Image: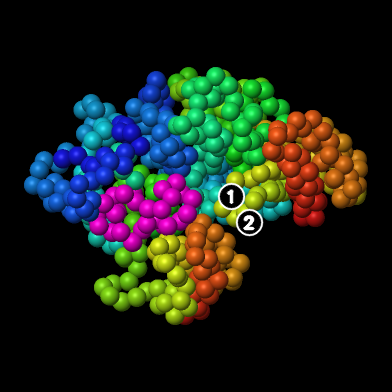
Amino acid sequence: MRPFELVVPRSLAEASSMAGKGVVYKAAGIDLLDRLKERVEAPEKIVNLLGFRAELARIERSGSTVRIGALATLTQVAEAEVLRGGGFGALLESAGEAATPQVRNRATVGGNLLQQNRCWYFRQAAFGCAHNGRGPGCLAQEGQNRYHAILGQDDCMRVHPSNVAPALQALGASVIVQGGKGERTLPLAELYPKAPDARGAEHTLQPDEILTAIVVPVPGADVRSAYRESREKLSFDWATTAAAVRLAVADGKVRECAIVLGAVAAIPWVAAEAAQSLIGKEPSRANFEAAAKLAFAGARPLAQNAYKVPVGQATLADALEAAARR
Amino acid sequence: MRHPPEDGTPPTFSRRAFLKGASAAAVTGTVPGALPTAPSGPTSYAPGSHAITLSVNGGERRLEVEPRTTLLDALRDRLDLTGAKKICDRGACGGCTVELDGIAVNSCMVLAIDAVGMKVTTIEGLAPGEALHPLQEEFVHCDALQCGFCTPGFVMAAHACLNKHKNPDRATIQHELSGNLCRCGTYGRVFEAVERAAGRKG
Protein backbone atom coordinates (compact mmCIF):
# COMPACT_ATOMS: atom_id res chain seq x y z
CA MET A 1 0.00 0.00 0.00
CA ARG A 2 1.19 3.48 -0.77
CA PRO A 3 0.92 6.06 2.00
CA PHE A 4 -2.36 7.92 2.39
CA GLU A 5 -4.03 10.32 4.77
CA LEU A 6 -6.83 8.82 6.87
CA VAL A 7 -9.51 11.31 7.88
CA VAL A 8 -12.23 10.73 10.43
CA PRO A 9 -15.21 12.99 9.69
CA ARG A 10 -17.47 14.05 12.54
CA SER A 11 -20.70 13.96 10.56
CA LEU A 12 -22.00 12.54 7.30
CA ALA A 13 -22.36 16.09 5.97
CA GLU A 14 -18.70 16.69 6.73
CA ALA A 15 -17.78 13.37 5.12
CA SER A 16 -19.71 14.34 2.02
CA SER A 17 -17.97 17.73 1.86
CA MET A 18 -14.59 15.97 1.70
CA ALA A 19 -15.25 14.46 -1.74
CA GLY A 20 -12.73 15.34 -4.42
CA LYS A 21 -9.98 14.08 -6.65
CA GLY A 22 -7.83 11.46 -4.97
CA VAL A 23 -10.36 10.95 -2.18
CA VAL A 24 -12.12 7.65 -1.50
CA TYR A 25 -14.59 6.61 1.18
CA LYS A 26 -13.98 3.56 3.32
CA ALA A 27 -16.35 1.44 5.39
CA ALA A 28 -14.67 -1.74 6.71
CA GLY A 29 -12.26 -1.55 3.79
CA ILE A 30 -12.27 -5.25 2.85
CA ASP A 31 -12.51 -4.49 -0.87
CA LEU A 32 -10.57 -1.23 -0.72
CA LEU A 33 -7.56 -2.64 1.18
CA ASP A 34 -7.33 -5.41 -1.39
CA ARG A 35 -7.15 -2.86 -4.21
CA LEU A 36 -4.62 -0.76 -2.30
CA LYS A 37 -2.43 -3.79 -1.66
CA GLU A 38 -2.60 -4.72 -5.33
CA ARG A 39 -1.62 -1.12 -6.07
CA VAL A 40 -4.37 -0.71 -8.59
CA GLU A 41 -5.45 2.32 -6.58
CA ALA A 42 -3.47 4.88 -4.61
CA PRO A 43 -5.76 7.52 -3.12
CA GLU A 44 -4.24 10.51 -1.37
CA LYS A 45 -6.97 10.62 1.21
CA ILE A 46 -9.29 8.00 2.64
CA VAL A 47 -12.38 9.22 4.47
CA ASN A 48 -13.15 6.70 7.18
CA LEU A 49 -16.89 6.10 7.60
CA LEU A 50 -16.48 3.30 10.13
CA GLY A 51 -16.88 5.75 13.00
CA PHE A 52 -20.57 6.07 12.11
CA ARG A 53 -21.11 2.42 12.95
CA ALA A 54 -23.17 3.22 16.03
CA GLU A 55 -25.81 5.02 13.92
CA LEU A 56 -25.44 3.25 10.60
CA ALA A 57 -25.27 -0.42 11.55
CA ARG A 58 -28.78 -0.88 12.92
CA ILE A 59 -31.29 -3.25 11.37
CA GLU A 60 -34.80 -2.16 12.34
CA ARG A 61 -38.32 -2.76 11.24
CA SER A 62 -40.54 0.27 10.92
CA GLY A 63 -44.03 -0.34 9.59
CA SER A 64 -43.94 -2.25 6.34
CA THR A 65 -40.20 -1.95 5.74
CA VAL A 66 -36.94 -3.08 7.31
CA ARG A 67 -34.18 -0.51 7.29
CA ILE A 68 -30.65 -1.92 7.19
CA GLY A 69 -27.87 0.51 8.05
CA ALA A 70 -25.18 0.46 5.37
CA LEU A 71 -22.51 -0.33 7.97
CA ALA A 72 -24.27 -3.46 9.28
CA THR A 73 -21.97 -6.42 8.72
CA LEU A 74 -22.99 -9.36 6.56
CA THR A 75 -23.04 -11.48 9.73
CA GLN A 76 -25.42 -9.02 11.39
CA VAL A 77 -27.71 -9.19 8.34
CA ALA A 78 -27.56 -12.98 8.18
CA GLU A 79 -28.45 -13.25 11.89
CA ALA A 80 -30.94 -10.38 12.22
CA GLU A 81 -34.10 -11.39 14.09
CA VAL A 82 -36.27 -8.96 12.13
CA LEU A 83 -35.35 -10.75 8.91
CA ARG A 84 -36.44 -14.20 10.09
CA GLY A 85 -39.11 -15.91 8.02
CA GLY A 86 -39.37 -17.25 4.47
CA GLY A 87 -39.92 -13.87 2.85
CA PHE A 88 -36.38 -12.66 3.52
CA GLY A 89 -34.78 -16.05 2.84
CA ALA A 90 -32.85 -14.85 -0.21
CA LEU A 91 -31.24 -12.05 1.75
CA LEU A 92 -30.28 -14.26 4.71
CA GLU A 93 -28.81 -16.91 2.42
CA SER A 94 -26.88 -14.46 0.27
CA ALA A 95 -25.39 -12.64 3.27
CA GLY A 96 -24.75 -15.84 5.23
CA GLU A 97 -22.87 -17.63 2.48
CA ALA A 98 -20.74 -14.77 1.17
CA ALA A 99 -16.96 -15.10 1.46
CA THR A 100 -15.92 -16.48 4.88
CA PRO A 101 -17.00 -16.03 8.51
CA GLN A 102 -14.05 -13.69 9.13
CA VAL A 103 -14.92 -11.52 6.13
CA ARG A 104 -18.66 -11.53 6.91
CA ASN A 105 -17.88 -10.44 10.47
CA ARG A 106 -16.21 -7.35 9.12
CA ALA A 107 -17.56 -6.58 5.64
CA THR A 108 -20.52 -4.21 5.55
CA VAL A 109 -23.65 -4.60 3.47
CA GLY A 110 -23.07 -1.15 1.94
CA GLY A 111 -19.54 -2.14 1.01
CA ASN A 112 -20.81 -5.37 -0.47
CA LEU A 113 -23.18 -3.43 -2.76
CA LEU A 114 -20.45 -0.99 -3.81
CA GLN A 115 -17.41 -3.30 -4.05
CA GLN A 116 -15.59 -3.31 -7.34
CA ASN A 117 -15.63 -6.22 -9.74
CA ARG A 118 -13.13 -9.09 -9.47
CA CYS A 119 -11.94 -9.32 -13.08
CA TRP A 120 -8.32 -10.44 -12.78
CA TYR A 121 -7.21 -8.08 -15.49
CA PHE A 122 -9.02 -5.12 -13.91
CA ARG A 123 -7.60 -5.83 -10.45
CA GLN A 124 -3.92 -6.27 -11.25
CA ALA A 125 -1.44 -3.45 -11.65
CA ALA A 126 0.29 -5.39 -14.43
CA PHE A 127 -2.72 -5.18 -16.74
CA GLY A 128 -4.30 -2.16 -18.36
CA CYS A 129 -7.83 -2.13 -19.71
CA ALA A 130 -10.44 0.42 -20.70
CA HIS A 131 -12.28 -0.08 -17.41
CA ASN A 132 -9.29 0.50 -15.12
CA GLY A 133 -8.20 3.36 -17.37
CA ARG A 134 -4.74 2.01 -18.10
CA GLY A 135 -5.38 0.39 -21.46
CA PRO A 136 -7.45 0.58 -24.60
CA GLY A 137 -9.76 -2.43 -24.56
CA CYS A 138 -10.95 -5.51 -22.67
CA LEU A 139 -8.32 -8.18 -22.06
CA ALA A 140 -10.89 -10.76 -20.98
CA GLN A 141 -12.65 -10.65 -24.33
CA GLU A 142 -9.93 -12.73 -25.96
CA GLY A 143 -8.01 -13.75 -22.83
CA GLN A 144 -8.74 -15.86 -19.75
CA ASN A 145 -12.49 -15.43 -19.37
CA ARG A 146 -13.70 -18.45 -17.42
CA TYR A 147 -15.38 -16.26 -14.79
CA HIS A 148 -16.62 -13.45 -17.00
CA ALA A 149 -19.95 -12.24 -18.31
CA ILE A 150 -22.38 -14.12 -20.52
CA LEU A 151 -25.27 -11.65 -20.51
CA GLY A 152 -25.53 -8.04 -21.64
CA GLN A 153 -21.83 -7.48 -22.29
CA ASP A 154 -20.80 -4.39 -24.18
CA ASP A 155 -17.07 -3.59 -24.26
CA CYS A 156 -16.18 -4.92 -20.77
CA MET A 157 -16.61 -8.53 -19.68
CA ARG A 158 -16.71 -7.94 -15.90
CA VAL A 159 -19.44 -9.47 -13.74
CA HIS A 160 -21.06 -7.95 -10.70
CA PRO A 161 -19.50 -9.62 -7.64
CA SER A 162 -22.08 -8.89 -4.94
CA ASN A 163 -23.99 -11.75 -3.32
CA VAL A 164 -26.53 -9.58 -1.57
CA ALA A 165 -27.33 -7.22 -4.47
CA PRO A 166 -29.37 -9.77 -6.47
CA ALA A 167 -31.21 -10.81 -3.30
CA LEU A 168 -32.00 -7.26 -2.22
CA GLN A 169 -33.06 -6.34 -5.73
CA ALA A 170 -35.36 -9.37 -5.99
CA LEU A 171 -36.93 -8.25 -2.71
CA GLY A 172 -37.59 -4.78 -4.14
CA ALA A 173 -35.08 -2.91 -1.96
CA SER A 174 -34.27 0.79 -2.21
CA VAL A 175 -31.15 2.56 -1.04
CA ILE A 176 -30.80 5.86 0.79
CA VAL A 177 -27.84 8.03 -0.14
CA GLN A 178 -26.66 11.24 1.44
CA GLY A 179 -24.79 13.88 -0.51
CA GLY A 180 -24.01 17.56 -0.41
CA LYS A 181 -27.52 18.36 -1.61
CA GLY A 182 -29.15 16.21 1.04
CA GLU A 183 -30.68 12.77 1.07
CA ARG A 184 -32.33 10.83 -1.74
CA THR A 185 -33.85 7.40 -2.09
CA LEU A 186 -33.53 5.32 -5.21
CA PRO A 187 -34.45 1.76 -6.19
CA LEU A 188 -31.42 -0.51 -5.76
CA ALA A 189 -31.45 -1.23 -9.51
CA GLU A 190 -30.69 2.46 -10.09
CA LEU A 191 -27.55 2.24 -7.95
CA TYR A 192 -26.05 0.45 -10.95
CA PRO A 193 -25.74 1.75 -14.53
CA LYS A 194 -28.51 0.72 -16.93
CA ALA A 195 -26.03 0.16 -19.75
CA PRO A 196 -22.75 -0.80 -18.06
CA ASP A 197 -19.71 -0.28 -20.27
CA ALA A 198 -15.95 -0.15 -19.93
CA ARG A 199 -15.56 3.57 -19.42
CA GLY A 200 -18.46 4.11 -17.07
CA ALA A 201 -18.39 3.69 -13.29
CA GLU A 202 -19.71 0.56 -11.60
CA HIS A 203 -22.31 2.54 -9.64
CA THR A 204 -24.29 5.70 -10.19
CA LEU A 205 -23.45 7.60 -6.98
CA GLN A 206 -22.14 11.15 -7.30
CA PRO A 207 -18.63 11.68 -5.85
CA ASP A 208 -20.04 13.30 -2.70
CA GLU A 209 -22.78 10.74 -2.13
CA ILE A 210 -22.58 8.15 0.63
CA LEU A 211 -24.80 5.08 0.85
CA THR A 212 -26.34 5.18 4.32
CA ALA A 213 -29.12 2.59 4.37
CA ILE A 214 -30.99 -0.09 2.48
CA VAL A 215 -34.76 -0.22 2.82
CA VAL A 216 -36.45 -3.55 2.16
CA PRO A 217 -40.24 -3.90 1.98
CA VAL A 218 -41.49 -6.62 4.32
CA PRO A 219 -42.66 -9.41 1.99
CA GLY A 220 -46.33 -10.41 2.12
CA ALA A 221 -47.31 -13.47 4.14
CA ASP A 222 -47.41 -15.76 1.08
CA VAL A 223 -44.12 -14.49 -0.40
CA ARG A 224 -41.04 -16.72 -0.26
CA SER A 225 -37.56 -15.97 -1.49
CA ALA A 226 -34.35 -17.92 -1.95
CA TYR A 227 -30.79 -17.46 -3.12
CA ARG A 228 -28.61 -20.10 -4.68
CA GLU A 229 -25.18 -19.89 -6.21
CA SER A 230 -22.73 -22.20 -7.97
CA ARG A 231 -19.08 -22.22 -6.96
CA GLU A 232 -16.01 -24.27 -7.70
CA LYS A 233 -15.53 -24.88 -3.97
CA LEU A 234 -18.14 -25.59 -1.31
CA SER A 235 -17.16 -22.55 0.68
CA PHE A 236 -14.84 -19.61 0.51
CA ASP A 237 -15.23 -18.92 -3.20
CA TRP A 238 -16.74 -16.41 -5.57
CA ALA A 239 -19.94 -17.47 -7.26
CA THR A 240 -19.69 -18.63 -10.87
CA THR A 241 -23.43 -18.08 -11.22
CA ALA A 242 -26.05 -16.91 -8.72
CA ALA A 243 -29.81 -16.53 -8.63
CA ALA A 244 -32.10 -14.69 -6.22
CA VAL A 245 -35.83 -15.23 -6.58
CA ARG A 246 -39.01 -13.97 -4.95
CA LEU A 247 -42.09 -16.09 -5.38
CA ALA A 248 -45.70 -16.08 -4.22
CA VAL A 249 -47.94 -19.05 -4.84
CA ALA A 250 -51.74 -18.89 -4.49
CA ASP A 251 -54.16 -21.76 -5.20
CA GLY A 252 -51.36 -23.89 -6.60
CA LYS A 253 -50.34 -21.25 -9.16
CA VAL A 254 -47.52 -18.72 -9.19
CA ARG A 255 -49.05 -15.35 -8.41
CA GLU A 256 -45.92 -13.23 -8.28
CA CYS A 257 -42.29 -13.77 -9.28
CA ALA A 258 -39.04 -11.81 -9.50
CA ILE A 259 -35.69 -13.17 -10.69
CA VAL A 260 -32.33 -11.42 -10.38
CA LEU A 261 -29.12 -13.18 -11.46
CA GLY A 262 -25.64 -12.59 -10.08
CA ALA A 263 -22.13 -13.21 -11.46
CA VAL A 264 -23.31 -13.42 -15.07
CA ALA A 265 -23.47 -9.74 -16.10
CA ALA A 266 -21.85 -6.43 -15.18
CA ILE A 267 -24.87 -5.58 -13.04
CA PRO A 268 -27.36 -7.68 -11.09
CA TRP A 269 -29.28 -9.10 -14.05
CA VAL A 270 -33.06 -8.86 -13.96
CA ALA A 271 -34.71 -11.75 -15.84
CA ALA A 272 -38.11 -10.13 -16.11
CA GLU A 273 -39.40 -12.20 -19.02
CA ALA A 274 -38.52 -15.47 -17.31
CA ALA A 275 -40.24 -14.30 -14.11
CA GLN A 276 -43.32 -13.21 -16.03
CA SER A 277 -43.47 -16.57 -17.83
CA LEU A 278 -44.16 -18.32 -14.53
CA ILE A 279 -47.20 -16.27 -13.57
CA GLY A 280 -50.30 -18.46 -13.52
CA LYS A 281 -48.26 -21.65 -13.87
CA GLU A 282 -47.84 -24.47 -11.37
CA PRO A 283 -44.67 -24.21 -9.28
CA SER A 284 -43.20 -27.41 -10.76
CA ARG A 285 -39.62 -28.31 -11.55
CA ALA A 286 -40.47 -28.55 -15.26
CA ASN A 287 -41.90 -25.03 -15.28
CA PHE A 288 -38.95 -23.69 -13.30
CA GLU A 289 -36.51 -25.27 -15.77
CA ALA A 290 -38.40 -23.78 -18.70
CA ALA A 291 -38.25 -20.34 -17.06
CA ALA A 292 -34.54 -20.82 -16.37
CA LYS A 293 -33.95 -21.59 -20.06
CA LEU A 294 -35.72 -18.39 -20.95
CA ALA A 295 -33.63 -16.39 -18.44
CA PHE A 296 -30.46 -17.37 -20.29
CA ALA A 297 -31.92 -17.27 -23.81
CA GLY A 298 -29.94 -14.16 -24.70
CA ALA A 299 -26.63 -15.47 -23.34
CA ARG A 300 -23.52 -14.82 -25.42
CA PRO A 301 -20.78 -16.90 -23.76
CA LEU A 302 -17.10 -16.22 -24.30
CA ALA A 303 -14.52 -18.86 -25.25
CA GLN A 304 -14.16 -20.32 -21.74
CA ASN A 305 -17.44 -19.67 -19.94
CA ALA A 306 -20.16 -21.46 -21.91
CA TYR A 307 -20.56 -23.68 -18.82
CA LYS A 308 -22.24 -20.73 -17.12
CA VAL A 309 -25.37 -21.21 -19.25
CA PRO A 310 -26.38 -24.72 -18.08
CA VAL A 311 -24.97 -24.15 -14.59
CA GLY A 312 -26.79 -20.83 -14.29
CA GLN A 313 -30.03 -22.44 -15.46
CA ALA A 314 -29.72 -25.19 -12.87
CA THR A 315 -28.87 -22.65 -10.15
CA LEU A 316 -31.95 -20.61 -11.01
CA ALA A 317 -34.24 -23.65 -11.17
CA ASP A 318 -32.88 -24.72 -7.75
CA ALA A 319 -33.52 -21.26 -6.30
CA LEU A 320 -37.10 -21.24 -7.62
CA GLU A 321 -37.71 -24.71 -6.21
CA ALA A 322 -36.19 -23.77 -2.85
CA ALA A 323 -38.46 -20.72 -2.63
CA ALA A 324 -41.55 -22.71 -3.63
CA ARG A 325 -40.85 -25.31 -0.93
CA ARG A 326 -40.55 -22.78 1.89
CA MET B 1 12.34 6.98 12.11
CA ARG B 2 10.68 5.30 9.14
CA HIS B 3 9.08 1.95 8.75
CA PRO B 4 10.90 -0.42 6.43
CA PRO B 5 9.85 -0.13 2.82
CA GLU B 6 6.87 -2.22 1.83
CA ASP B 7 8.17 -2.81 -1.64
CA GLY B 8 10.10 -5.91 -0.71
CA THR B 9 13.52 -4.30 -0.43
CA PRO B 10 15.53 -6.83 1.56
CA PRO B 11 16.65 -5.54 4.94
CA THR B 12 20.38 -5.82 5.55
CA PHE B 13 19.85 -7.45 8.94
CA SER B 14 17.04 -9.20 10.81
CA ARG B 15 13.78 -7.40 10.21
CA ARG B 16 12.48 -8.11 13.68
CA ALA B 17 15.70 -7.03 15.36
CA PHE B 18 15.57 -3.83 13.38
CA LEU B 19 11.96 -3.20 14.36
CA LYS B 20 12.64 -3.93 18.01
CA GLY B 21 15.42 -1.39 17.93
CA ALA B 22 13.21 1.05 16.11
CA SER B 23 10.35 0.80 18.59
CA ALA B 24 12.74 1.22 21.50
CA ALA B 25 14.03 4.38 19.85
CA ALA B 26 10.51 5.64 19.47
CA VAL B 27 10.02 5.76 23.22
CA THR B 28 12.63 8.46 23.59
CA GLY B 29 11.73 10.38 20.43
CA THR B 30 8.79 12.70 20.00
CA VAL B 31 5.67 10.78 19.16
CA PRO B 32 3.12 12.90 17.38
CA GLY B 33 -0.46 11.82 17.88
CA ALA B 34 -3.28 12.39 15.45
CA LEU B 35 -3.69 16.10 15.01
CA PRO B 36 -6.86 17.93 14.11
CA THR B 37 -6.39 19.68 10.76
CA ALA B 38 -8.06 22.77 12.20
CA PRO B 39 -8.70 23.80 15.82
CA SER B 40 -12.13 22.22 15.63
CA GLY B 41 -11.66 20.15 12.50
CA PRO B 42 -11.95 16.42 11.89
CA THR B 43 -9.25 14.07 13.10
CA SER B 44 -6.66 13.48 10.44
CA TYR B 45 -3.88 10.94 10.32
CA ALA B 46 -1.41 12.28 7.77
CA PRO B 47 0.89 9.85 5.94
CA GLY B 48 3.67 8.88 8.36
CA SER B 49 3.84 7.59 11.92
CA HIS B 50 1.22 8.10 14.58
CA ALA B 51 1.14 6.88 18.16
CA ILE B 52 -1.97 4.89 19.00
CA THR B 53 -3.03 2.70 21.89
CA LEU B 54 -4.44 -0.74 21.26
CA SER B 55 -6.09 -2.98 23.80
CA VAL B 56 -4.35 -6.29 23.17
CA ASN B 57 -4.82 -9.45 25.22
CA GLY B 58 -6.07 -7.48 28.19
CA GLY B 59 -3.31 -4.87 28.27
CA GLU B 60 -2.99 -1.38 26.84
CA ARG B 61 -0.20 -1.24 24.29
CA ARG B 62 1.14 1.99 22.89
CA LEU B 63 2.67 1.73 19.45
CA GLU B 64 3.41 3.63 16.32
CA VAL B 65 1.61 2.93 13.09
CA GLU B 66 1.03 4.57 9.76
CA PRO B 67 -2.51 5.05 8.46
CA ARG B 68 -1.80 2.21 6.02
CA THR B 69 -0.51 -0.22 8.66
CA THR B 70 -2.75 -3.25 9.01
CA LEU B 71 -3.61 -4.68 12.39
CA LEU B 72 -1.66 -7.79 11.41
CA ASP B 73 1.51 -5.83 10.65
CA ALA B 74 1.08 -3.81 13.85
CA LEU B 75 0.76 -6.98 15.95
CA ARG B 76 3.65 -8.77 14.31
CA ASP B 77 6.14 -6.00 13.60
CA ARG B 78 5.38 -3.50 16.38
CA LEU B 79 4.22 -5.66 19.27
CA ASP B 80 6.18 -8.82 18.47
CA LEU B 81 3.01 -10.89 18.59
CA THR B 82 3.90 -13.20 15.74
CA GLY B 83 1.27 -15.89 16.37
CA ALA B 84 -1.05 -14.44 13.73
CA LYS B 85 0.53 -15.34 10.40
CA LYS B 86 0.89 -13.25 7.28
CA ILE B 87 0.17 -15.74 4.54
CA CYS B 88 -2.09 -14.43 1.76
CA ASP B 89 -2.47 -10.90 3.19
CA ARG B 90 -5.80 -10.64 1.32
CA GLY B 91 -8.34 -12.12 3.72
CA ALA B 92 -8.34 -15.36 1.78
CA CYS B 93 -6.63 -17.87 4.06
CA GLY B 94 -7.52 -17.15 7.69
CA GLY B 95 -3.94 -17.47 8.93
CA CYS B 96 -4.07 -14.00 10.49
CA THR B 97 -7.33 -14.56 12.37
CA VAL B 98 -7.66 -12.63 15.64
CA GLU B 99 -10.70 -11.60 17.65
CA LEU B 100 -12.00 -8.06 17.72
CA ASP B 101 -14.42 -7.76 20.64
CA GLY B 102 -14.70 -11.56 20.63
CA ILE B 103 -15.49 -11.86 16.91
CA ALA B 104 -13.10 -13.51 14.44
CA VAL B 105 -11.68 -11.21 11.75
CA ASN B 106 -8.82 -11.27 9.28
CA SER B 107 -6.31 -8.90 10.88
CA CYS B 108 -4.65 -8.40 7.47
CA MET B 109 -7.80 -6.66 6.24
CA VAL B 110 -8.21 -4.30 9.22
CA LEU B 111 -6.33 -1.04 9.53
CA ALA B 112 -4.57 -0.87 12.90
CA ILE B 113 -6.15 2.54 13.52
CA ASP B 114 -9.61 0.97 13.05
CA ALA B 115 -8.88 -1.40 15.93
CA VAL B 116 -8.44 1.45 18.43
CA GLY B 117 -11.09 1.16 21.13
CA MET B 118 -11.75 -2.51 20.46
CA LYS B 119 -10.52 -5.53 22.41
CA VAL B 120 -7.95 -7.40 20.33
CA THR B 121 -7.33 -11.03 21.28
CA THR B 122 -4.53 -12.93 19.62
CA ILE B 123 -3.43 -16.54 19.99
CA GLU B 124 -0.88 -15.33 22.58
CA GLY B 125 -3.73 -14.08 24.77
CA LEU B 126 -5.82 -17.24 24.91
CA ALA B 127 -4.17 -18.69 27.99
CA PRO B 128 -1.87 -17.18 30.61
CA GLY B 129 1.86 -17.93 30.62
CA GLU B 130 2.91 -21.39 29.52
CA ALA B 131 -0.52 -22.90 30.15
CA LEU B 132 -2.50 -24.14 27.16
CA HIS B 133 -6.08 -23.26 26.40
CA PRO B 134 -8.36 -26.34 26.22
CA LEU B 135 -8.59 -25.81 22.47
CA GLN B 136 -4.82 -25.86 22.17
CA GLU B 137 -4.67 -29.00 24.34
CA GLU B 138 -7.19 -30.72 22.07
CA PHE B 139 -5.25 -29.69 18.97
CA VAL B 140 -2.23 -31.40 20.53
CA HIS B 141 -4.26 -34.41 21.65
CA CYS B 142 -5.83 -34.89 18.18
CA ASP B 143 -2.56 -34.16 16.38
CA ALA B 144 -4.55 -31.58 14.43
CA LEU B 145 -1.62 -30.08 12.61
CA GLN B 146 1.26 -30.98 10.37
CA CYS B 147 3.38 -27.98 9.49
CA GLY B 148 1.42 -25.86 11.96
CA PHE B 149 1.55 -22.61 10.06
CA CYS B 150 -2.24 -22.27 9.78
CA THR B 151 -2.82 -23.50 13.35
CA PRO B 152 -2.97 -20.16 15.21
CA GLY B 153 -5.62 -18.98 12.74
CA PHE B 154 -7.60 -22.19 13.15
CA VAL B 155 -7.44 -22.03 16.94
CA MET B 156 -8.65 -18.41 16.92
CA ALA B 157 -11.47 -19.16 14.49
CA ALA B 158 -12.42 -22.15 16.65
CA HIS B 159 -12.31 -19.97 19.77
CA ALA B 160 -14.63 -17.45 18.14
CA CYS B 161 -16.88 -20.33 17.07
CA LEU B 162 -17.13 -21.51 20.69
CA ASN B 163 -17.82 -17.93 21.82
CA LYS B 164 -20.80 -17.99 19.51
CA HIS B 165 -22.10 -21.55 19.84
CA LYS B 166 -22.32 -23.40 23.15
CA ASN B 167 -22.48 -26.88 21.72
CA PRO B 168 -21.79 -26.74 17.99
CA ASP B 169 -22.35 -29.81 15.81
CA ARG B 170 -19.91 -30.84 13.11
CA ALA B 171 -21.72 -28.85 10.40
CA THR B 172 -21.63 -25.68 12.50
CA ILE B 173 -17.92 -26.15 13.22
CA GLN B 174 -17.21 -26.69 9.53
CA HIS B 175 -19.21 -23.58 8.64
CA GLU B 176 -17.46 -21.42 11.25
CA LEU B 177 -14.01 -22.68 10.23
CA SER B 178 -14.65 -22.32 6.51
CA GLY B 179 -12.54 -19.16 6.41
CA ASN B 180 -9.33 -21.04 7.23
CA LEU B 181 -7.18 -23.00 4.84
CA CYS B 182 -4.81 -25.83 5.74
CA ARG B 183 -2.60 -26.95 2.87
CA CYS B 184 -1.55 -30.05 4.79
CA GLY B 185 -5.21 -31.10 4.85
CA THR B 186 -5.64 -31.66 8.58
CA TYR B 187 -9.28 -30.53 8.54
CA GLY B 188 -10.73 -33.75 9.91
CA ARG B 189 -8.54 -33.67 13.00
CA VAL B 190 -9.11 -29.95 13.47
CA PHE B 191 -12.89 -30.52 13.53
CA GLU B 192 -12.38 -33.38 15.97
CA ALA B 193 -10.27 -31.18 18.25
CA VAL B 194 -12.90 -28.43 18.26
CA GLU B 195 -15.65 -30.96 19.01
CA ARG B 196 -13.66 -32.30 21.96
CA ALA B 197 -12.96 -28.80 23.27
CA ALA B 198 -16.64 -27.91 22.92
CA GLY B 199 -17.53 -31.02 24.89
CA ARG B 200 -15.13 -30.05 27.70
CA LYS B 201 -16.56 -26.57 27.79
CA GLY B 202 -20.16 -27.78 27.88
Q: Secondary structure at mark 2?
A: loop
Which residue carries the number 2 mark? A234
Where is residue A76? Give x, y as percent.
53, 51
In this picture, residue A154 sits left or right of residue A14: right
Which residue is depicted at the point 69% across and 38% down?
A: A304
Where is residue B57? Give x, y as percent.
30, 62
Which residue is depicted at the point 32% across and 38% down?
A: B7
Are discs 1 and 2 both within one chain? Answer: yes
Q: Are marks 1 and 2 in contact (CB under 8 Å)?
A: yes
User: Which one is in front, A279 or B174?
Assistant: B174
User: Which one is in front, A128 or A8?
Assistant: A128
In this picture, residue A158 sits left or right of residue B26: right
Which residue is depicted at the point 46% across and 56% down?
A: B94
In this picture, residue A317 sits left or right of residue B158: right
Whether B77 is among the magenta residues is yes
> How many C-alpha atoms fall within 10 Å of the one at disc 1: few (<14), some, or many (≥20)?
some
Query: Which chain hosts label 2?
Result: A
Which residue carries the number 1 mark? A237
Which residue is depicted at the point 91% across and 40% down?
A: A280
Type of the residue with mark 1:
Asp
Q: Which residues are magenta?
A: B71-97
Whether A112 is among the magenta residues is no
User: Which one is in front, A267 or A85?
Assistant: A267
> How many C-alpha atoms fall within 10 Å of the one at disc 2: few (<14), some, or many (≥20)?
few
In this picture, residue A38 sits left or right of residue A152: left
Type of the residue with mark 2:
Leu
User: Which one is in front, A295 or A78?
Assistant: A295
Where is residue B47? Give x, y as percent.
26, 33
